[in-house]
Amino acid sequence: MEREKLSFINPADHSIFGEIAAHTPEEARQAVEEMKRAFPEWSAKSVRERADILGKLQAVLVERRDEISSVLNQDCGKSRQDALIELFITLDMLAQYRVKAKKWLKPQRVSSGLYFFKRSVVERRPYGAAVIISPWNYPFTLSLPPMISALLAGNTVVLKPSEVTPATGALIERLVQSVPELAPFVRVIHGDGKVGAALTSAKPDYIFLTGSTATGRKIMQAAAENLTPVSLELGGKDAMIVLDDANLPAAARWGAWGAFFHAGQTCMAIERAYVVESKYDEFVKLATQQAASLKSGYSAALDSPYFMGPITDPRQVKIIDDHIQDATSKGAKILTGGKREGMFYDPIVMVDVNADMKIMRDETFGPVMPIVKVRNEEEAIRLANDSAFGLCASVWSDDAQRAKRVAEQINAGAIIVNDALAQFGVPMLPFGGVKDSGFGRAHGKDGLLQFTCSHSYALGGVPVKFDIATILRESGHYKLATVIMGVLFGATFKQKADALSEFFGKK
């Protein structure tokens, strides 16, 4: 039986530049079993050994940077420099995690409280075989960092890249195989949703998904059958708040960048902008000028003249078009952009939008920046929080204390002040959402430790006479136990004094 093929299709011109055979669901299940068998050998290596092996992968990534940017350029349609951003972020995280992992994974001594003769220790152990399912919008940097974290923690990995960008998945497989010490402990499985479903039902020890909220619900339902722990980094509808003391030229420039970078195909793209009425007209004017200055197109050159490439997945074009049509039919106005040629849009600035429109409720994942006039800071906060999603947000103000105070009232997982998107690139800053944007965290210590389970130890010799545990467990000590309770835990001085009086027989 001939295998199904996944074609490498450049979304800019629909040219085919290669193909790879898809795996079957049965092969996906076998990969999980294989990684379970390989787990004892990998987890037995010290953290230092694992970090050194991943250091060899780090060297390969640097050496083959031009190949990596070229594949991402063709697979996603993004510029070579934007592709290099993916690699840069990945390398930054890999380099820092390799250094920090030993400290993060070291057993931690914790207080034993009143159990004076015991020593309490928390140890982090890897789960086993971890399945990582990655998306098509950033197929490199949303695959490698979680894979690296899982491996450093001691897990083996089955990675399923998106079938929309299979050339990047094939590239990652080649990169891993170029490190012989690492290759036996990672499997890259190519295929569509059927393969992903097979992986989640194969009883892996952990599942990490970056994808849509709809996919996250399906993964969670499947994982529940086997009580498999999961981490879900899902969709967003991120809000930008522009206050009356904001630097408007900077807010317009970087707000537009945050809305239109990679044609808006970013889970943390600015998809809603709330601007106080005293600054609204000027901000709209500046944002429209910024959008009109950004060119869309495709180039394989190292220095592309285009800011935006195409939409990568044809299915996403239908969603974007539907959101635009729904908004304009309900009274929204497009100030710039609005036309599509094939998979390419020009950046779109939209006003007169409201909460009844899909473009203000659902994830658009396209180059559209809806701008809303608000009366004041309080209304901006209320509307920013009026969303099913809670991934990221940005706050713009020249008053640092005010910006922090507003940020503290936004119900989102990662908030940035006077910038856009950049919080994702901070290696030590946990990244993830709340509400329909999922749970669990990527990046930093939290992102690595989520691939481990804590195991607790209470260590010491046999119980001794004056150990609290011994006193409480031996019969005939009820009254003594109540006295000890009063002395130790009495909430008032009188309660403590009464307990002491009782102990000395004075009550």
Image: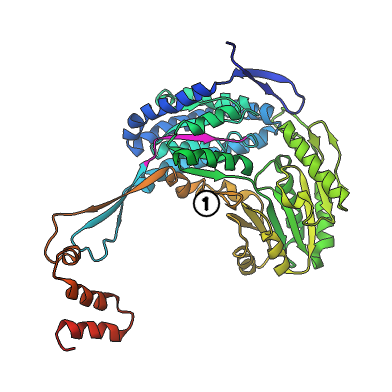
Compared across the picture, whether 446 is left or right of 465 comes to right
Compared across the picture, whether 87 is left or right of 352 comes to left
- Say which element carries label 1: loop
Q: Does the magenta stretch include residue 133?
A: yes
Q: Name the residue under label 1.
A: 429
Please tell me which residue is depicted at 28% across the width and 53% down the height of the picture. 121
Most common secondary structure along the magenta stretch: strand
Res. 94 in view: no
Q: The residue under label 1 is which amino acid type?
A: Leu
Res. 426 in view: yes
Which residues are the magenta region? Answer: 126-135
- Residue 148 drawn at (x, y percent): 47, 37
> Observer-nearest residue: 462 or 151?
462
Compared across the picture, whether 288 is left or right of 486 comes to right
Compared across the picture, whether 45 is left or right of 203 comes to left
Please tell me which residue is depicted at 63% across the width and 42% down the height of the picture. 214
State the quadrant of the N terminus.
Answer: top right
Q: Which residue lies furthest to the top in this view?
A: 1
Please rate how many residues cluster around mark 1, counting C-alpha atoms within 10 Å: few if below 14, some from 14 to 19, many from 20.
some
Q: Quadrant of residue 226?
A: top left
- Residue 504 drawn at (x, y percent): 14, 84
Q: Does the magenta stretch include residue 327?
A: no
Please tell me which residue is depicted at 80% across the width and 34% down the height of the picture. 344
- Residue 272 drawn at (x, y percent): 73, 54
Please tell me which residue is depicted at 57% across the width and 35% down the height of the picture. 134
Q: Which colour scheme is used?
A: rainbow
State the quadrant of the C terminus.
Answer: bottom left
